[in-house]
Amino acid sequence: MTITRNSSLLERLQAHKEEGYLSLHMPGHKENTGLASYLNVLNADLDITELPGFDDLHDPEEVLARSMKKAAALWDVPKSWFQVNGSTGALLAAIRGATRRGDKILVARNCHKAIYHAMELCGLEPVFLLPPVEETFGLSGSITPEMVASALEAHPDVKLIVYPSPTYDGVLSDTAGICAVAHEKSIPVLVDEAHGAHLGLTDHFPPHAMAQGADMAVASLHKMLPSLTQTAILHATGRFLKIPQINRQTGIFQSSSPSYLLMASMDGCIRLLEEQKEELFAAWSRRLAEFDDLAKGLKHLRLPGHGGEAGASYPGIFGLDPAKIVISTRNSALNGVELMERLREDYKIELEMALDRYAVAMTGLGTDDTMPARLAQALLELDEKYGPAQEVAPLETLQELPPRKMSIEEAAMTEGGVDFLYDSMGKVCGEYIWAYPPGIPLITPGEVITPALVADVERLYRAGVKLIGTRGKPPYTTVAIEG
């Protein structure tokens, strides 16, 4: 195979394999796929280290540098970095690069746990924005420019604004409006766009955050586009933030030995989008429209923004990403977890996640032509089989934040004691408790364990939602600190 300047990273790896080099470098398998069967399945013969001709992610000058420039051009941004530690590492790098220890940041309460970990590691003081609860389906709604303006009025010393758009459930916020408010005060905006790598690349989906004025955005390539798990991209403008500082942090929060298989998948993804995005996105959009048409007959299960509600709007929600199919079970005899189980066991359909009141089906660029009929038929059959809910339960969602007694960092580092959760009310929580997925904390270290929080944990647990604590075993025990 002849290698040229424009050869992809994968082509270079394959050519290197064919040359028959004696491997006296990392990794330890030495490209010997005969050593063990799993190595062959994992294409370990293409797994190399930083060799001449393959570039260096931490000092890119050749094939990786060109690929990241192509990515920046695709999203029409000044600077993009490939990330091999997922959106998690990119968010940590972005937040650390934009703040200094002790800074105050304005952050949506429904952010992913990676952002909470960044606040803990960087010793930041959060000012939380609590999104409204959408009253029909119980989804966390959008962050609004008015909420941001009010918070900045009360906290003029905020140094950074962070929120997810789209959320795990596909809820979009008015990023253009938020950025207008923030930029009047020269405050940068970071959008957690982990679930939105597909946005704005064509007219089939809403615009992405950077096109609406965001200063930084983080997107997981693997969530919606054809790239290997753990691959992400970080975009930045350099408007209020120093590009060299962000670049430095990307090196801190990801491996100094990045996988060439991961990087080859990112390079391949960018090339595919360059060449075929219009055709591929049109087919994706067509499949979603076909599903909407087929699912219109649902009686009890509801699909916000899809099926018979395609194009509908909902109070508290600025917009919905059509790539996500949220299946509300509030009016059904099934709850979200039960629906997910039935689809898995009876139809071999695996959803992304489920909570008590809904489940989420996550489409992607790789979704094929079988999806619309297969998912719609399964939902129609389950809808008919299980029928309506005997009683539509009221929305019981935490409407106010627990009071804070300690900083996240201080509480997370305090020993505390393992207590029965119900006996811990009034004490300070020493850990995070969350449902995973989506990985949004119900309570963070330093906040007081309230009766409302305990009731919320109990409700989710009884519905079959998996709960995780960083040190205890919710809902039974938690790490509590005497207030």
Image (cartoon, grey):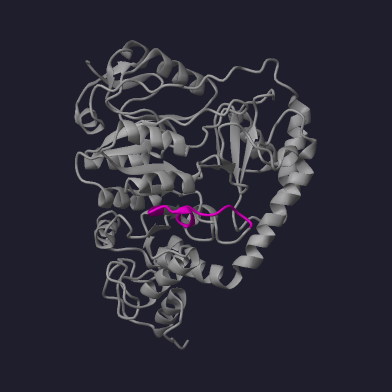
Determine the residue positioned at 74% across, 32% down. Answer: 382
Give the quadrant of residue 171: top right
Specify the segment rendered in magenta: 204-217
Give the camera-side residue of 478 and 17: 478
Q: Is residue 324 magenta?
A: no
Residue 14 placement (x, y as % from top left): 45, 78
Q: Position of residue 65 (x, y in %)?
A: 36, 73
Can I make out residue 43 in this image? no
Position of 412 compared to 116: left or right?
Answer: left
- Image quarter hosting the C terminus: top left
* Residue at the bottom extreme, as displayed: 2
Front residue of 464 and 138:
138
Relative vertical location of residue 213 with respect to residue 137 in this rendering, above or below: below
Which is more toward the observer, 462 or 427? 427
Q: Residue at x 29, y 56 (%)?
A: 241
Direction from residue 370 to residue 400 in the image, left or right: left
Residue depicted at 43% across the width and 33% down the height:
147
Q: Mainly helix, strand or loop, the magenta region? A: loop
Quarter location, residue 451? top left
Specify the farthest residue to the front: 184
Q: In the figure, 231 relative to 15: above or below?
A: above
x then y, percent, for residue 217? 41, 53
Residue 264 versus residue 452 in the image, above or below: below
**Image mark count:** 0
Q: Tell me which corner region of the image, top left, top right, bottom left or bottom right, holds residue 202.
A: bottom right
Is residue 215 in the magenta section?
yes
Specify whether residue 29 is in view: yes
**Which residue sits at x=60%, y=31%?**
315
User: Could you tell me residue 401's position as x and y percent?
Assistant: 38, 23
Residue 194's place in the image compared with 420, above or below, is: below
